[in-house]
Amino acid sequence: GKQPKQLSDPVVRLDCLNDYFCGINNEIDNNLIVYYKNKRCLEENNFNFMEVTVEGVRRAIMDISSNAVGDDDIHIKFIRLIFHEIRDVLLHVFNFSLLNHSYPSQWKKALILPLPKVKSPIESKDYRPINILCVLGKIIDKLVYQQLCTYVNDCNILFKYQSGYRSMYSSQTALIKITDDIRLSMDKREIVILTLLDFSRAYDCVNHELLLAVLESYNISDNVIQWFRSYLLNRNQRVKSGGGMLSNWKINPVGVPQGSTLSALLFSLYINRIHEIIMFSRFMCYADDMQLYISCNINKINDAVGAMNADLCNVSDWCKSHGLNLNALKCKSMILGTSRAIANVDYRNVSPIMIEGTVLKYENSFVNLGLKMSNTLSWSEQVDHIVKKVYQCLYQFKRLSFNPPIHVKKLMVQTLVFPFFDYAQAAYCDINNMLLNKLQVAQNACIRYIYNLKFDDHVTIYYKNLGWLKIRERLEYAVLTMLFKIMKYEKPDYLFERYVSMHNVHNRNTRFGSTTLLFPIHRTVIYTKSFHVKSIRLMSILDNNIKNVLTEQSFKKLLKDKLVKRYE
């Protein structure tokens, strides 16, 4: 990274930061652009914009969650407040932009807030740019995203294992797939080599001309391509310090604007064909988070390492040709297996995973899509992390200068604490009773905070009064609601295809057949702990009046009511 010329001069420093944030040079071979353009199928229907409606604009405005104010100095709350008076003007402007294939230049101005990535930043590379976009730009981006996303999903354009920003796909479904694959390999007495890839400033490296060619290859119409060209080119940005000082404006020649709803979808389309060069490993993507994994018998471990290294070499070459860079120093690798299998791995004689000449150390644990994963899937580190976060929050709550009323405390816990319990819960549904109890003690501490209870006071009655589920029931709820959605929507494909219902086997309709799922064949108790098996087991003992309801909302309500009754 470029060093600021004069760290003592904040204005110069801001200009240096802006130069660094705009300073990625990624020349693309023109033959690659031609290659993508030639993949366009002229016989198929093109994607064209539809005119937006007043109701569509209203929903887009309500969906914007960020309150950050961009260079236009207009707050989203102000737009909501006067929407009825300006709705016709907004509708005209947005439709004019779409139909005339032009993105207003004023909306292409972004304020960049430099967020330190380290405690004592001294170089430009020590900062992460946070883009604050103009409010009207955020609204039209949301409208375009909705139309493009519908087209991409209807045409099944994104490859099977891209889990980012798709309906019914999530980081949780990606983690369920990966952890169940690992459990199945353990069940076969195999070990798994897992490598997490880290892209260096991924969104900032997207080449505009190549992205437009990629969009064209997916039968995006010429008019829409022209709109995206206007959207991408000549975007201006300047850096704003915490004290309000501003750098000079500078045009950013590359990248998709972070902070825009469109960015993640455009990046996913940009890298959508990367899977074509992976020959030996299984893989999973969540937007710009990518991981490869391969299973083998322990005596074939070096062959598996060689196969993965071949795939990683292909991935590296593909990224370079597309202007992307892997940050080898932040990539991680781990060998996973049962405790006995890991004890038998002779790391001294295991060939290393290598990325662009950098040797990756085999870790004992790392964070994977927000989940602390160990090499035996023990989940003790994940539980310790959750418990620590919960008590940190409660400590901060108790430091408040006033004692909030009970209903406010309840809201604080639900909003700020429960997400720690609930994140990707179904992916580690095999946690043991000791870890479950550890989480339960932390959740009980939340109850005691809300009602000012003593440590030895019983809390079960308060769960019933609040309508809250304890940890074990929360876990069952997470697993069952996930399975219900998988079977109802038949997505994501990589999870739905694992389930076989009885009427599919016998080719005839049986009562409750669509929800009578067959248990998969497996060798050991290890796979019994998988999401796959646990979800089938829990569904099989569920009341038929619950599992055969038609809507997700009804299923969740009936299921929660049943689980809460355990506390009576």
Image (spheres, grey):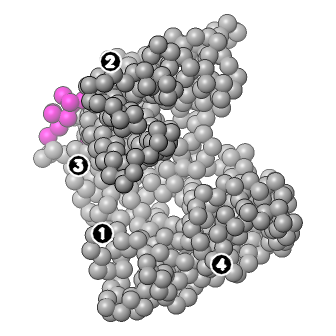
Pick whichever, 87 or 463, lies toward us: 463
**N-terminal-most mark, 2 or 3:** 3
Residue 193, placed above or below residue 474: below
Give the extent of the magenta segment: 335-346
CA–CA distance between discs 2 and 4?
A: 60 Å
**N-terminal-most mark, 3 or 4:** 4
Pick whichever, 396 or 251, lies toward us: 396
Which residue is identified by label 1?
Answer: 118
Instruction: Name which residue type carries label 4.
Output: Asp
Which tag is nearer the camera, tag 1 or tag 2? 1
Q: Is residue 462 visible?
A: yes
Which tag is nearer the camera, tag 1 or tag 4? 4
Instruction: Name which residue type carries label 3.
Output: Tyr
Q: Residue furthest top?
A: 511
Is 66 colored magenta in this rendering?
Answer: no
CA–CA distance between discs 1 and 4?
A: 30 Å
**N-terminal-most mark, 1 or 4:** 4
Q: Which mark is residue 72?
A: 4
Is 337 colored magenta in this rendering?
Answer: yes
Residue drawn where x is 35% and y is 87% of the image:
4
Residue drawn where x is 31% and y is 91% of the image:
8
Q: Which mark is residue 525?
A: 2
Q: Judge from the rendering whether residue 292 lies leftward or rightward of residue 104; answer left or right.
A: left
Provide residue 291's location: percent of width, then percent of height.
41, 49
Q: Is residue 209 visible?
A: no
Circle 2: element type:
helix
Q: Which mark is residue 362?
A: 3
CA–CA distance between discs 3 and 4?
A: 49 Å
Provide residue 148's location: percent of width, then percent of height.
71, 56
Circle 1: element type:
loop
